[in-house]
Amino acid sequence: MFLKAKRIFAFLLLLTFMITPFGNISMASRDEAVQGSASKFVLSRKEVVKGNEIVLDYQSEEEAEAVLVYNTPSGNKKEVHLDYNEDSGMYSTAITPDEAGEWTIDTVLLNGNNVSSSSYELDFKVFESVKDQYGKEGPFIYDDAFQDEPKVLVSDLNQLISQVYGIDQQGNTTELTVRIQGSGVDEVFNVYNDGSSVITDENSSKYQPGSYTLTYIIEGGSDVVKTLHIVSDVADSNFVRLSGEEVSLSANTEVARVAGKNRYGTSVEISKNTYNKADSVVIANGTKFADALASSSLARNLKAPLLYAAGSKLNPEVKAEIKRLGAKNVYIMGGFAAVSREIEAELSREKLNIIRIFGGNRFETSIEIAKQVKKFKSQNKAILTNRDSFADALSAGAYSAQNSIPMFYTTKNKLEAKTKKYIKDSGVKEILVVGGAAVVSNNVVKELTSMGVNVKRIEGSNRYDTSIKFAQTYYNNPSTVVMASGMDFADALAGGVFAASKNASMVLASEKLSSAANRYVTASGVSSIYILGGEKAVSGSIFSALSSSETTTPQPAPAPVPQPKPQPTPKPNPSTEGKIKIMLDPGHGAGSKHNRGFIGGNEGDSNWAYHLILKEELERRGFIVGTTRPRKTDDPSLAARGQAGRGYDLLLSLHTNATGTKNLASGAEIYDDVNPSYSNKTLALKLGNAIARSQGIRMRGVFYRKLDNSTNWYGVLRNNEAKNGFLVEHCFHDNPTEIRNYVRNYRKVAVASANALAEYYGMK
Ligand SMILES: [Zn+2]
């Protein structure tokens, strides 16, 4: 794979700029402007030491030639071109700023059109030296986030340990070694600069409750020593993260899971459990939370389900659901970057009436949605939440839907002018701010108060806690509770209308429940609990714990239950019913076209050759194996590669790595899905260890490369529809020893990989 952008669109860019001055394409249509600002740029960091790289991604599923013009600290202008990146499937570039000081954005050009730069956060700051940025020379250990003597559950240990990281001589984050001693344990681990795993699920049982000493060691710098206490009871933990316990329900509580194969399928299942028919459906992007979150109240008023779309084609289950409901109208949330023209055209071909609701950005789209809601019900209340963070707002979706309360967005410190104006003009008198001052500051609260708005804030120590505070405040004594994943927005938001239809509160969960959540759902009045999403979203352990309170008298579901009723039995785990299906994706295409730094061949050819051997070894062990490249010359899009995983247990995108620098690197890496619903770190580690061991190289770790908090940087993982998906970097192909060794040992690596997979899936 490639760590840097390729320049295959350079010619196209040049052409664009040759034409622009003559006026042929300089007129920005409204659509294009909207499309531009609804997508976003992501900077890998906002502060950097001179001479280091900042990676700039343009996150949009649409093709776009992007050029940014910066004002440099010395008052010059610098043009930055973003090129297509074959791994992320997006436009990207690495900037190496050569001047210290503030770099501010001057102009943003998308497809040659000048779009407003104010809707993006693109400014960054460059420091002269490491000392200039941190007050001391590198290398050193950065430990500011580590609290004094934390008390943690063993399940939170990795998260805690990785709060500390190294800064090298150049000011970049770097790996550390950590030694853990105490209570009969003395072990040394590497901690990588993205905080990837140190303690695996398998060896976590070694860490018994007690006191431990952590010694962080960095080459060429001073050690840092920390004390921590491992506790066994969640009530004793002071570590701010979900901590959990098992749940025992009262005998009369019925539990049902509403889940599809993925977020699209789950939104369909939720719809089926809410409506027998509907005149309208609401469609929002299934990978970006903002429009979906704001649309809950509109969907409820339209008596419509919230369904998801992404890319250029409707999910077939979503399409079938629109037919089943007999819908005539489709309300599309957001601009073309959110829900594409192709999908709109597909819906039009079904003779559906399309109403697209959008503004220039998520602030404006939420205002447009509020205007629609106002047609149904005038409301002097509103909900305000941070535009970049769905975590706290998830629990508000059901409440917003049930009470027709519009939801608006703000940045942390300042209300957008348009939002402020709408709040004033539409007569909002009361605003519920969701989240603490870290997401919506007291400045914003002051701004609202000075407008004569009464402000109430709901906050918890984390998203799970916030959801419980919300539930306790607005749904005291509920008879029905809906549970959804707190790590992803999709199920909770699609479930907002469902929860509203049942007067139910929304409680967030993932692997376990907090004590407060446990108390809330086990309260005597709760007779039904619906769990949204598959086991990866809300874990099986909660579900079994809940449903195994086996004195259950079969209970008619509560009052207005539309059919068909969800099945209160968990789906059998595909790993135990028949054969396991693995989709292999040999990275890139054939020949040197996609190559970079590969010594003695081409990456795409090597990936393809290796996959044939791995396929053979997997089939020998009873797996059903598919391929995204039946022929060597095939080069499907990243979306097609990811979607090929549909119906499979695992998608493996096979690659070799390159540093892009003169430094030789070594080892194997696995990139796991950043979405916890698809992630499987246990399997990733197992496979990565087998791959590394078979070549006699080290396993560098399981990594999570993100575009933002919820999206994969790798295009193939972003589009993956298999139950789990990994991008595997078998070794470094610009390291001559390593690549030659790998190519000579394809069979050995394939055997080790197939054995690891067979063992995991119980197929040996
Ligand atoms: Zn590759």
Image (tube, rainbow, N blue to C red):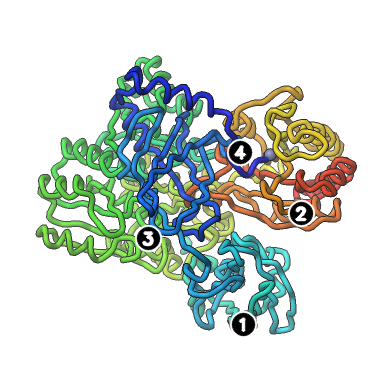
State the separation of the CA atoms marked 4 and 3: 36 Å
Residue at which label 2 appears: 666
Mark 1 or 2, nearer chain start: 1
Mark 4–mark 2 distance (CA, rounded to whole Å):
20 Å
Is 212 left, or right, of 404 in this rendering?
Answer: right
Query: Residue 454: x percent and y percent?
Result: 14, 61
Nearest to the eye among marks 1 and 2: give it: 2
| Residue 395: numbered disc | none
Q: Are marks 4 and 3 in contact (CB under 8 Å)?
A: no
Q: Nearer the viewer, residue 435 or 126?
A: 126
Q: Which residue is mark 1?
A: 225
Badge 3 amino acid: Ser
Q: Amino acid at mark 1?
A: Val
Q: Which residue is painted at 49% across and 78% down in the image?
A: 147
Work out whether mark 1 precedes mark 3 in sequence or the reverse, and give the earlier one: 1
Q: Going by the image, does 760 lie left or right of 431?
A: right
Tag shown at residue 87: 4
Q: Residue at x 23, y 60 (%)?
A: 444
The disc, 4 or 3, on the residue closer to the chain's N-terminal end is 4
Instruction: Specify whether tag 4 is near ligand 1 (CB below 8 Å).
Output: yes
Mark nearer the viewer, 3 or 2: 2
Q: Amino acid at mark 4?
A: Asp
Question: In terms of secondary structure, where does tag 4 sit?
Answer: loop
Q: Depth-wise, is mark 4 or mark 3 nearer the camera? A: 4
Residue identifier under label 3 = 467
Q: Point out the image quarter for the N terminus.
A: top right
For the residues labelled 3 and 2, the Cα–Cα distance comes to: 44 Å
- Name the element at disc 1: strand
